[in-house]
Image (tube, rainbow, N blue to C red):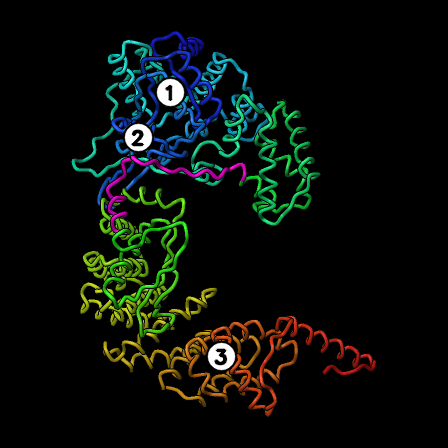
Amino acid sequence: MMGMIDALCDLDARVVLFPVRHHSPACARRVGSLIRAMRPAAVLVEGPSDFNDRLGELFLPHRLPIAIYSFVRLDADRRHSAYYPFCVYSPEWQALLAAKEVGAAIRFIDLPWADMARVDDVSNRYADHGLRRSEYVKQLCRETGVETFDDFWDRCFELDADLPLPEFLRRCHHFCLHSRLLEEVRPSDRLREAFMVKEVRRAMDEFPGRILVVTGGYHSSAIRERLDGANDTMDEQPEALPEGTERGIALTPYSYERLDNLRGYDSGMPNPGFYHQVWQDLGTNRDSHRTLLAKVATTLRKRGQPVSAADLIAGESTARGLARFRGHETVWRQDLVDGVIGALIKEERAIGLGHPLLDAVHEVLRGGERGALAEGTVLPPLVIDLRALLERHELQPEMKSRDLELNLEETPARERSRVLHRLRILPVAGFQRTGGTDLIARTDLSKIWERWKIVWTPDYDATAIEAARYGSTLAEAAAAKLAEQAAAGDLKAEDAATLLLDASLAGLTRLAGEFLQRLADLIRGDSDFFSVTKSLGHLLHLFIHDHVLETAGRADLASLVRETFSRGLWLLESLGQVAGRDKELLAGLKTLLDAFERCGAKLNLDRVEFVSVFHRVGEEKRQTPLVRGAAAGTLWTIGESDAATVFAQLLLFSDPEHLGDFLTGLFCMARETVQRHRELVLSIDRLLAAYADEEFLTALPSLRLAFTYFTPREKHHLGLTLLEALGIKEAKSLTRLEATPEVMARAMAFESRLFETLRKHGLRGAEPH
């Protein structure tokens, strides 16, 4: 074992292996120093070897962080992608810069990601999977009294800035070797290591001088063993990809938010903003925490949460005390976080919930850096096509947000809409539909229109580049993305209808035709009322607006609308009581009514069947008041019932626990009809007037929900109608109460109980007015 460590640490060897933890400032600083001192003939870096012919792009004046983005299409419906991110303190980045500075040859030596995508789906290639999963690391954390691998790494490698390079290498190689010994090495790692050894040997043949190999420390010992002839199974190679497999690689902007593993990304080091500050302060300032604490105060003030100088002093003092207690003089990342919690957060924090002060600390420690690519970077064909389309249709995103309204009856607007919907499907950041015609919401159908918000965002370039894995043109990429979604094994009718609608909105007529047939098959086998009626809603949109959307196969679409409508009715009648889904249930019933009203004559929908089903549902005593109210409202709306019948049904649900639910269903389905019958308002008023205060309080929540189906103007009109019917003619307008109805009702109930108690005990008191 010691022989292996000695071999790994031999700085005079022909091939020197430098172990790194990705995104470690300590490794970045020392690998740069070693290259400048060693001046090797070649520097070989863990990175995608299929980017070697474009290495020059890395040295353009980009703003970091950036990433190499690799993608592959393994079959018709499976696309995979991965990232090799670089920030200013990444060891790989500093190795590249130092190698260029000393004139060394530079090569990436890792197996192209597309070649291992079948066996390794880890999307961030510069993460710490090998080290994080090691039982050895977990045991070290327990022995040294730290909580996480990140804390252990900081304590042993980042904190001691003066640790000599030989000692650093010995410590790091020792740690990485033992982390590997207790674990079963993944097949993908063995494939990569075999490939890296081949690349090292190729460099040894090509360059007569010394070679420095910079890889994740987890791989160092395996590479050393293979180079020395031990355990050298050079026949290990990935399964060949089929001829014509789509694959690509490009640079893309990245961000510290994506780099931060505390944000849920499998991305290596936590709190990149902290290490960025440490990197900037190298050699000039060992109190980086003070700069960061000042940034926390600034962040809080911007949020309207000022923090005093005394608070900052208390936080820093606590952090310094924790650092000394933990055995280091420099206040480090976790010391700063714990210092703020201990000194400034006085109230108890619920588990899993944040705190404004702690949120500000993590925001500062995360950092806000976002990358940008320099001019001259080779872009994927999709990005070039996208830029041309945006320019042609005057849709380029700009720093200032703009709203765009499109009348889809006009051909140019329809073409612009299709481009925007393709961007939404992928999605490319900066394009958001914010309004427009909505059949289900019963908006004005005299003009078919959309409103979009277009604005440049820092994620625009990255999302455009990363969408390139779906195709080389915008139309091709959007179609591929929808096809990928359609291939999901658990696709329901509702999902397929959404895909059909998206394909139609994006002008992908061939795909829309395919989805239409797929949807027909799914609907015939779907027994979920909610899924089927949501599908019907999308089909209605397509059918009503076919002249605008140019939906493929109009006759097929009409037939499917008719079939979906009938299936929805059948499922409604067999639907039992459903708890907790009232909103979805009413939406489904409303869709059936919309289909009947808007397409009944054109599609020859069976009126007798429709009326019979809603009669039976409305008379089913085991059904909920909500559904029975909706059935009554539906029949009233289409003229198959009258006010007298509805009033009679209302009396069946006059108890406080059921009245509001019945009215909710009624108002949802018959909002316009209800407003024409002031007798209904009077009937409801009489029922409520007969309630005791406690009964009214019981009924109030569901009553309020029922009346939300009316607009404020409509509710105002209903209130005036009621006052007029009661003979209160001087009421010109209704003012808004300062207190909520619930508060008023509780006050009335309290008064009622109070005066009842006074009467019970023979005490006199003024009656409430």
Quarter of the image holding residue 760? bottom right
Q: Is residue 592 above or below residue 11?
A: below
Q: What label does residue 57 carry, if any? A: 2
Q: Earlier in the sequence, mark 2 or mark 1?
A: 2
Q: Quadrant of the C terminus?
A: bottom right
Residue 384 shown in magenta? yes
In the image, taking residue 286 as reference, residue 265 lies left or right, namely left
Q: Position of residue 304 (x, y in %)?
A: 61, 50
Badge 2 amino acid: Glu
Q: Position of residue 535 (x, y in %)?
A: 31, 64
Using a 10 Å C-alpha cutoff, classify the residue at mark 3 as few (fewer than 14 neighbours), some (14 to 19) or many (20 or more): some
Using a 10 Å C-alpha cutoff, classify the residue at mark 1 as few (fewer than 14 neighbours), some (14 to 19) or many (20 or more): many
Residue 152 shown in magenta? no
In the image, taking residue 714 as reference, residue 461 lies left or right, namely left
Secondary structure at badge 3 equals helix
Q: Position of residue 704 (x, y in %)?
A: 54, 73
Using a 10 Å C-alpha cutoff, classify the residue at mark 2 as few (fewer than 14 neighbours), some (14 to 19) or many (20 or more): some
- Is residue 692 or residue 156 the one in the foreground? 156
Identify the magenta region: 364-389
Badge 1 amino acid: Val
Q: What label does residue 214 carry, if any? A: 1
Badge 3 amino acid: Glu
Secondary structure at badge 2 equals helix
